[in-house]
Structures are given as structure tokens and as C-alpha cells.
Amino acid sequence: MNPVDVTTKLRAALDGLAPEPPAGPSLFDRVRADVARRRARRASVLCGLVVLVVAGGIGVTVAPRATETSGPTAGQAAGTGLPIRPATTLVPSGTTAITVVLHTKTPGLGNPAVPARTFGPETVTDRAQIEGVVALVNRVATAAVPEGPVNCPADRGGTMEVTFTGPAGIATARLRVTLSGCRSNRLEMPDGTAVELANDGAEDLGDTIRGLLGLNWTWQT
């Protein structure tokens, strides 16, 4: 056979073959491309939010995590950043009596001419008064933990103890309030749990409790 004819026939056969379609992307490539698109969209949204906040001063509210507790019974005021108060530190609603005893100061401290005095113990069983004090103590937030050294006024040792008891006469909670120095409101539970409570707004927590219970105790230190 003529070499020219052989070459012509081979070329015609090759020209008649259909080209193979290009290979499609693998599953890995498709997933990687999808992830890249998602990241690009997320970055675009975040950039837009940043621009809006900077340009317009828009406030952004972040929802609390599911593990956090919010609301009045948690003792956490919105936006305070204070520690969340454990539910185990709430005074039981079945409280039937509140007993208060107050020591004005440690003998000899402060003005030595003014004697140390003790008021009480005074037990209150009025339902409305008890419910008011229980609601107050359960509403206040935990106290902020001070950072660094703290300068306190003179500590004369005065204390007020508020004991909550249930129907069986068993103490269910005890609040210890210091009356001088770096004042504190320590709530202690029977299981050993304790928490430091803040004051009732601008008012001293001990003063508010005495007012709710009608205990008009006044003294000079």
C-alpha cells in the first residue's frame, strides 16, 4: 500500500474520533468550593455590619448563652456584668418567720463614750412583711468583686443577722450584714452555699429590710 494512502487513512480515522469531555470536579473539590463561597458571604455580611456600626452608631444586642439564667429570680441586672446568682441561693418562698438581731458595734470601738447596744432578737411572722423581705433578698444581684486594694471606712464591728425559718422552725437561710467598714451582705444557705449580695439600689440592704419589717432601730456609734 502506498505510504501516502496509509497516512491519509490514519488522519481521517483520528479526525473522526469524538474529543473526550473534560473531567468534572471531584466531590472534594465541590465541597471545598462550597465552603469558600460560604466564608466569602459571611465575611461580606460582617464587613457590612462593621460599616453600619461605625457609620451609624447602631447598637448590637447579644443574646445570653443557653447556659446562663436571666430574669429577676436570677439576681442579675441586665448589662451589669455581675456574676450570675445561683438558684440555690434564693430564700424559699415558704418562709414563715424572720428573726433579726443587731449589734451596733464592738465594745470600745468608735466613740468610747457611746456604749455598744444590741437590738432584738425580734421575730416577725406577718405574712405581708415576710413576703416583702423574701422578694427583696431574692431580687438583688450579687455584689461586684472589687479589683485591687480597697480603702474602707473605720470598722467598728457592728453586724445585723437576719434568719429565715420555715414551717418546721428550721432555718432555711441566714443573711449577715456588716454595719461599718467595707460593708457586706453575706447570704448563707444550710448546704454551705454562700453569696455576697449587692445593696438595694442606692439604699443599704440592712436599712431596707428593717424598714420593711417595721424595726425602727436607731443608734449612735
Image (tube, rainbow, N blue to C red):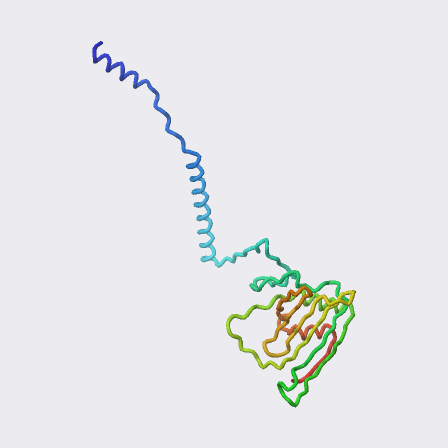
194 w.r.t. 19: above or below: below
- Looking at the rendering, which quadrant does residue 20 occupy? top left
148 w.r.t. 67: above or below: below
Q: Residue at x 61, y 66 (%)?
A: 142
Q: Position of residue 78 (x, y in %)?
A: 59, 62
Comparing 117 with 57, the one in front is: 117
* Residue found farthest to the top: 1
Q: Position of residue 167 (x, y in %)?
A: 78, 65
- Looking at the rendering, which quadrant does residue 161 occupy? bottom right
Rendered-image quadrant of the N terminus: top left
Q: Is residue 141 left or right of residue 100?
A: left
98 w.r.t. 64: above or below: below
Q: Position of residue 215 (x, y in %)?
A: 73, 77
* Residue found farthest to the bottom: 113
Q: Residue at x 66, y 63 (%)?
A: 89
Q: How many marks?
A: 0
Q: Residue at x 28, y 16 (%)?
A: 12
Q: Position of residue 37 (x, y in %)?
A: 44, 42
Comparing 36 with 179, the one in front is: 179
Rendered-image quadrant of the C terminus: bottom right
186 w.r.t. 119: above or below: above
- Looking at the rendering, which quadrant does residue 107 occupy? bottom right
